[in-house]
Amino acid sequence: MKFSEKEIRIFKGISLIAAIFTVVISLTMLFSLIQLKTINPLDNPSVQSIKEQFDRDPENRDKAELVRAMDLMARKAYFSSRWQVETGSYLLLAGALVFVVLQRLVAGSEKQTKSLLPDKPDIDSERIRNNRYLIISAGALTLLAVVSSFVLRSELPSPGRSQIQNEPIDTPGATAGINLPGDVNYPFFRGEGGRGNAGGSGFPTEWNGTEGKNIKWKIAIPKPGQSSPVIWGDKLFITGAGEGVLAIFCIDKNSGELLWTGSGKDFPGASSEEPESDAEAGMAVPTAALNNDIVCAMFGNGNLVCYDHDGNLKWGKHLGVPQSSYGYSASLLIYNNLVLVQYDSQEKILLSGFDPESGEQKWETIRSGRPVNSSPVLAIFDGQPQIIVNGNPNVTSYNPINGKELWTLPGVSGDVAASLAVNSTMVYAVSDYYKLIALKPGKAGSAAWEDNSYTPDVSSPVANDQFLFLATGNGDAVCYNAQAGDTLWTHYFENPFYASPIICDDKVWLLDRSGNMYITDADSKFILISTSPLGEHTDATPAFSDKKIYIRGRANLYCISSD
Amino acid sequence: MWEYMDVAVLIGALLVTAWMVLKKRSRQGLVWVSVFSLAYFGFYRQGCICAIGSIQNLSLALFNDNYSIPLSALLFFSIPLLAALLFGRVFCAGVCPLGAIQELTGFRHVRIPKRVEAVLTTIPFVYLGLAILFAATESQFIICRYDPFVGFFRIDAPFTMVIFGSLLLVTGIFVNRPYCRYLCPYGVLQNIFSRFSRKHLTITPAECRNCRLCESGCPYDVILQSDLVTAIEKPERSLKESMSYMLMIPVLAVAFAVILYNLAPSLSAVSNNVKLAKEIRLEKEEGIKAVSKASVAFFESGKTEAELFTDEQQIIGRFRKGAPWVGLFLGLSLGIGFFRLTIRNVRYDYEPDRGRCYSCAKCFKYCPVKIKN
């Protein structure tokens, strides 16, 4: 394309203006950034000071109003600076693009001339120069290596600090006490952190409980219950209750041998009461939780017990008989040095942390809202470990160390029984006959998307960063785009689901109430890998460990293995 | 599914680019391939998955058992290198969206003094070494973090990166492909593989007339002039000199390895846990209060200082192990690069430097030799 000289002059003029504009915007943005970094309105000392005064005198309404007003002002200032910076980015980009396009047009209209460079370089003298550079570089770098060996010695941490060098560290991938799913341990309801993602691979995908295909062992569970198995090392733990007995069973996961039975009510102050609950629920709905030293179990009458792995009672506590229409069901979690209990009763709803060694209560937080039947999950967002509860009506996150509320966002209402699904960026809450909602967590969090087409009543959803999977009480299995909320696939399996789906080995493991395990690809397309019948009614969520799957049926516990 | 679609498009784009460069000799065709790549890999797929970033996935997978590299990332890493072995740097020429955005905006040509160019072109080697080290030690993915153009593709980036990207684009108008020349770590691998390419772009379609017209035609200054060697006066002395220069290569390699080994504790400061441990130690030993968000989270997490310091030691230990290998690579690269400059190659034609040439085809129009259809 050819342009007249006048047009070229205009292009050059506009391009010069665009260049100046780009430079000015760059400098303004840099200035804004420096301002935002150095005087962050949210860290304004006067706001902090007023907040501290309010903390000391929380009943003072005037101070509360002042804190609100100043906090609002600081936030407005902060977000206004952020807006300036973000808008500046687009202006800068626009300026640069105008400059580039016009320069392109100007350059395209200029006549190309082929010209010779003044002199052909003298290769010989260049080579001689390069020889010299090689020698000088080798000498200089050798010298630098020697000097750095002396100078940089001080960079090493001092010996006193490395006394703990030989101490073992946590599981690889551990972040501030919250672990990634491992191949062996499956410590909580729905695995590590209660998040429904299991580690390991090579699990059998086909079995038949009736014919014995790939069934390594099968044992009758001494007492019935709805709780799920949990595993540490070679030991599997499961709870049961009936005929006045509350029990925790320790089973050798390789042979199915019952190693010991711990009572859930043989401790001072224990309750023998059995509050009313749903006929199917009973006293052993919550799943036990464990770590390297202890296993703790909660029962439907409010008895909380902790045993060591050899069956010695460490402590027991009665937390009060929970009044719940369906029966108490929240499973336990252990985070660092605290046993975490979500206690939901008609009278009060709490979250508490107990010392695993002594049973001493370290903190208790009174939650707001109505009681629920969901279980808490452990997750990390923005580097902050948190315990998150699918409450009614809010999803609320707490600091697991001290129970302080970190954030709360509107979630779901009705009969809230499903636990949360989490991935690295979102939290998903659901309740039946209401809705599924995806939340961006945090104080400034918000709802990302929601849907009310498929809502499980008991089974909890599970997510990874790409997909969210859920299974409903009507027998539907659904896959959503975890970020955008699009329904990627649905499949009707006919039988209802109570057990929660688990993501493991790039597959989704869906166990229906009739004992059929459906294994699908954890992908955007529905691909059914296999269907395996157990031949027994199943409501508990399976556990995965060492290439073996453990499923609690109504009467029996199964170890499924292809070995 | 998308990933495999991307792999198919990648292969297709590489083949079309190779055809444009080697058979059609069409600069115009190459520009259209660049436009397509920028639109597809850049704006439509938002710069991800990308061959440059896949270096980190591979490093992480090689040195960490608990991470398995996605097949698509492995393919994105290896297919462009295979293409470089067959056809030269056709990936850089028209397929890489980062190369394409710079290629389409680089239309003026300022010559950089050779010595400045020589110094600047060592940066990608250092960048590559550090990117591998940081990824292998699970510290940071610096290539993705400091990708200057991905913010344009996603219309979302930290504004410092928008400034950096915009300035790089503006600079690229005059100093063409600044990211490819002075930063791109994947370019280092392309450079190495392309040196052994089976076929490569030629400046002239037939016999070179040594007219020198193409000397000014390469914006990257990677055309090697012809060098018709006359008889060597003292071949024995020349051989001895070459041998002594070759000995400098291991010297440089060892020196770099020692330097990087000594720098390992400083380099490990990119790890968040090491940074945090230093902050906590400062508070403990010198009373400087730790105020960062990470330290606040640490205190609330209940993790002990002993655990944190153990973690720090482990990370520094991993840097100690990995850093000398990075140094060895840098020393060998520099040594071999220098050594190549000390030996004389007989060259009858003007040729592109196979390692550094981006196969952009800009030199075609400068060659007066044409083949009639």
Image (cartoon, coloured by chain):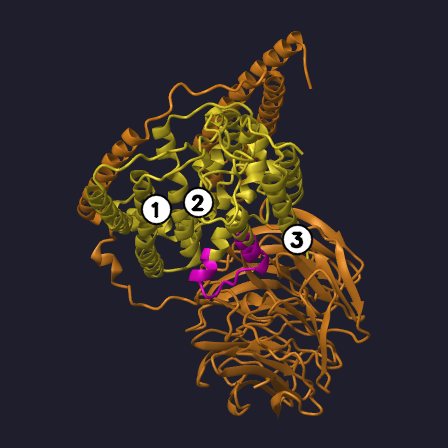
Chain colours: A orange, B yellow
**Disc 2 packing (10 Å; few <14; some 14–19; many ≥20):** many
Q: Which mark is on residue B188?
A: 2
Residue A79 appears in the picture as rendered:
no
Nearest the viewer among B112 and A409 is B112
- Identify whether A117 is placed above or below B191: above
Task: Same chain for labels 3 and 2? Say yes or no.
Answer: yes
Q: Amino acid at mark 2?
A: Val
Q: Residue furthest front?
A: B231
Q: Are marks 2 and 1 in contact (CB under 8 Å)?
A: yes
Q: Disc 3: which chain?
A: B
Q: Position of residue A33 (x, y in %)?
A: 48, 30
The secondary structure that dominates the magenta segment is helix
- Reading the image, the residue beneath label 3 is B8
* Quadrant assignment for the N terminus of chain A: top right
Label 1 marks a residue whose chain is B
Distance from the alpha carbon under mark 2 to that under mark 1 = 10 Å
Image location (x, y in percent) of residue A531: 73, 78
Of the image marks 3 and 2, the number of the one nearer the N terminus: 3
Q: Nearer the viewer, residue B197 or A336?
A: B197
> Along the horizontal axis of the image, is A438 left or right of A174?
right
| Residue under pointer 1 | B333
> Foreground residue, A154 or A222?
A154
Q: Which element is circle 2 on?
A: helix
Q: Label 3 vs label 1: CA separation?
A: 33 Å
| Chain under callout 2 | B
**Amino acid type, callout 3:** Ala
Distance from Cα at disc 3 to Cα at disc 2: 24 Å
